Amino acid sequence: MAGTFEIVSTEEEAFYFRLTADDGTLVAVSPRFKTLKGVVAGINAVRENAATGLVVNRSRPELASR
């Protein structure tokens, strides 16, 4: 399953990216970057770290049974 990174420009001359799943589900939205080069670096960082990233459960225990 491969997602799609979409680069979006804003009226404030900034950029951000959206990561969507194959079915169109929105998976992540980045913070805003001042440059196109910055947003591309952000995408590359997600690509490099997502597969090896640790999963940390910070949810409240009382919500775990829902």
Image: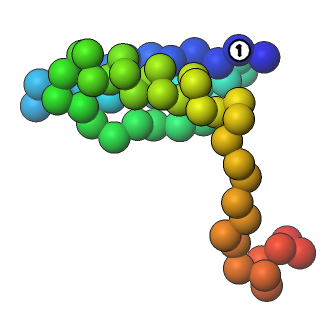
Percent position of residue 39, x then y: 32, 23
Q: Residue at x 45, y 23 (%)?
A: 43
Q: Label 1: few (<14), some or many (≥20) within 10 Å?
A: few
Q: Quadrant of the C terminus?
A: bottom right
Q: Quadrant of the N terminus?
A: top right
Identify the residue under disc 1. 2
Residue type, mark 1 in image:
Ala
**Which quadrant of the figure has residue 30?**
top left
Relative to 17, residue 31 above or below? below
The colour mode here is rainbow
Percent position of residue 63, x then y: 77, 77
Relative to 30, residue 20 above or below? above
- Which of these two is toward me, 19 or 46? 46
**Which quadrant of the figure has residue 38?**
top left
Percent position of residue 32, x then y: 27, 36
Judged from the image, the secondary structure of the residue bearing numbered disc 1 is loop
Q: Residue at x 79, y 85 (%)?
A: 62
- Residue 56 shows up from this direction: yes
- Which of these two is toward me, 11 or 47? 47
In the image, farthest residue toward the right: 65
In the image, farthest residue toward the bottom: 62
Task: Count all numbered tags in the image, as a single digit.
Answer: 1
Percent position of residue 40, x then y: 36, 17
Q: Residue at x 83, y 74 (%)?
A: 64
- Which of these two is toward me, 55 or 3? 55
Q: Residue at x 57, y 23 (%)?
A: 47
Q: Is residue 7 left or right of residue 24?
A: left
- Which of these two is toward me, 33 or 63? 33
**Which quadrant of the figure has residue 51?**
top right
- Residue 24 shows up from this direction: no
